[in-house]
Amino acid sequence: QVQLVESGGGSVQAGGSLRLSCAAAGYWFSRNCMAWFRQAPGKEREGVAQVNTDRNIRYADSVKGRFTISKDNAENTLYLQMNSLKPEDTAMYYCAAGGYWNCYSDSIIEADFTDWGQGTQVTVSS
């Protein structure tokens, strides 16, 4: 049974940091494209970052230089280190898994990902 479980969300002041984790069960982790998405109230879900290998990582322009995606294949865990957080980063953050080659798309596309976690809330106050 495949399962993605996020953790690490919370409330933080602007300029602070959080580290999100996504535990993946039932996946051949190293053979998937893994991603983080987020959805703010009243807005569409947007791709934040995706990774399949250490050399193939893509970020949304809005988080470049502030967020870092990484994965531990041995532990089947995906991470998102978020630094210099801004109020506009407030959203529900979701972990997602898709086909390995989807990570070579020109952008982070929601339709490329077939499995999703339930999300973890991140709230950044000014």
Image (cartoon, rainbow, N blue to C red):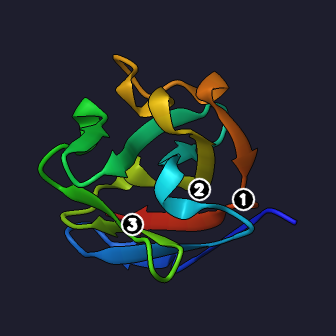
Q: CA distance from mark 2 to mark 3?
A: 23 Å
Which numbered marker is on residue 125?
3
Which residue is more in the foreground, 67 or 114?
114
Q: Is the residue under label 3 in contact with that under label 1 (CB below 8 Å)?
A: no
Can residue 44 be seen in this snapshot? no
Q: Secondary structure at mark 2?
A: strand
Q: Quadrant of residue 39?
A: top right
Q: Position of residue 56 (x, y in %)?
A: 25, 41
Q: Earlier in the sequence, mark 1 or mark 3?
A: 1
Q: Residue furthest top?
A: 106
Q: Earlier in the sequence, mark 1 or mark 2?
A: 2
Q: Position of residue 52 (x, y in %)?
A: 39, 47
Q: Is the residue under label 2 in contact with that under label 1 (CB below 8 Å)?
A: yes
- Disc 1: which residue: 117
- For the point 59% across and 56% down, which residue is it? 95
Q: Measured along the vertical axis of the image, is residue 23 above or below residue 84? A: below
Can residue 98 be seen in this snapshot? yes
**Number of numbered discs on residues:** 3
What crowding class fits label 2: few (fewer than 14 Cα within 10 Å), some (14-19), or many (20 or more)? many
Q: Secondary structure at mark 1?
A: loop
**Could you tell me the amino acid type at mark 1?**
Gly
21 sits left or right of 40 in the view: left
| Discs 2/3, front | 2
Q: Secondary structure at mark 3?
A: strand
Q: CA distance from mark 1 to mark 2?
A: 5 Å
Q: Measured along the vertical axis of the image, is residue 14 above or below residue 96? A: below
The quadrant of the rendering that contains the C terminus is: bottom left
